[in-house]
Image (cartoon, rainbow, N blue to C red):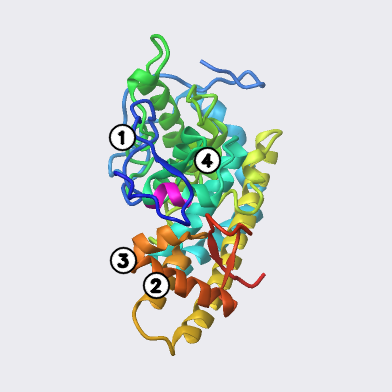
Amino acid sequence: MTPPHTQQGDPPETDVSDEADLWFLQGPIEEDAVQSKSGQSVPGKRVPGPSVTGTSAPNPPARADEVETLTPWIRAEAQNAAKLGQAAALLGALDDRLGRVPDGWRQRLALLEAVEIGWLAGDRVGLDQLSLWLSLRLTRMQDDAQALARTGWAVRRLTGQLRPVTYLIRFLGRSEASAEGDDRLSDRVEGWTAMMSAASDLHPISRAAVGFNLWSLAGLGHQGDRLEAAVTAARFAASDSRGGAVFAPLALGGGTGLRAYGPPSARMAQWYDGLSNAVRAAMRHLDALEAWQNAATSAIAPLSGRTPARLLQVVAEWPVVSARMAEEATGASRAAIQRNLTWMEDKGLLREVTGQGRFRYWAARLSP
């Protein structure tokens, strides 16, 4: 989109127009031969079978090398049954909770999760940068455009209609042209999806752990591959949800599972613990957001006009908000937005997060 004229109080911004080489740009926010240290290899090309999940056709029988690769992971799930049960129960509670809150709150969690995953993957993107990019498709001169776009891709894939269980290449936004030499990307993806099909008897949370840990072994390495692997696993883990939690948080609680090491039994235990911690962090955030929403709604009740209520909705959906973002989202004038932001800050509903006189961002003042 063509950026609006920059107004006083906004950061200097540029429109990222040269996106030909940014494979991770896939539209708006709502859319949809390597060996392990143990010497085990991930199978490569095989006769195409059904999709990873979501099909009525039976999966083809697992090959001997697939069984050998999966055996320690199957044992690891059994050894950590109690941790799996706890993680599954927590994710189920989050699924139920998100099914009863405004849709924008899921976007908020996706923004927080994507930033945390990005940092673990080496992309140092802040919430203010990401919010500006996704809401107005704008960046500032000092921003790393590719890191920003990768993190934006993560948000869209965490919330969008595209799912890795249907067609992984499309989900990733890759093409055969991104493969090196004669090793076709489709062959690598086919090997990985074959392993995921062979692991269909595992719980979705466990399958997500397997998929994440076998990602690089399958030759799916790419710029930002840790981010891709984590986002794909987050969607896999929530594949049995009822529509509330379309992804399972993995990084909010510190990303223990995404930094796991050791044999499969240890990795699986860390995966379950990491997911449980992330879900607890998400639930605490939702509790604080709900309490803030109730208090803020009561506080603005005496005010006239529709701008205060619309502004509260925007602040609930975005972890940080600039006046420019709020103006675009609500359709209100800049003067009305600035007046309401100042009033809400004075009432203790918002806090200004930059500490600057210009180029400012506000966030909901949530209780710890």
Q: Which residue is located at x 37 percent, y 41 percent?
A: 165
**Which residue is more in the foreground, 72 or 231?**
231
User: Label 2 neighbourhood size at 10 Å, few (<14), some (14-19), many (20+)?
Assistant: some
Residue at (54, 54) in percent of width and height: 112
User: Of callouts 1 and 2, which one flags the residue occurring earlier in the amino acid sequence?
Assistant: 1
**Which residue in the protein does label 1 denote?**
50
Amino acid beneath label 3: Gly
Say whether marks 1 and 3 touch (CB < 8 Å): no
For the point 33% across and 39% down, the residue is 26
Given residues 270 and 292, the one toward you in this image is 292
Labels 2 and 3: the sequence-earlier one? 3
Q: Nearer the viewer, mark 1 or mark 2?
A: 2
Residue indicated by mark 3: 331
Is 250 left or right of 16, judged from the image as shown? Answer: right
Mark 1 vs mark 4, foreground winner is: 4
In the rendered structure, find residue 320 and report the number of the disc placed on it.
none
Tag 2 secondary structure:
helix
Q: Amino acid at mark 2?
A: Ala
Give residue 19's quadrant in the image. Answer: top left
The Cα atoms of the two marked residues, 4 and 2, are separated by 41 Å
Q: Residues within 10 Å of mark 4 (few under 14, many from 20)?
A: many
Q: Amino acid at mark 1?
A: Pro
Image quarter where the N terminus lies is: top left
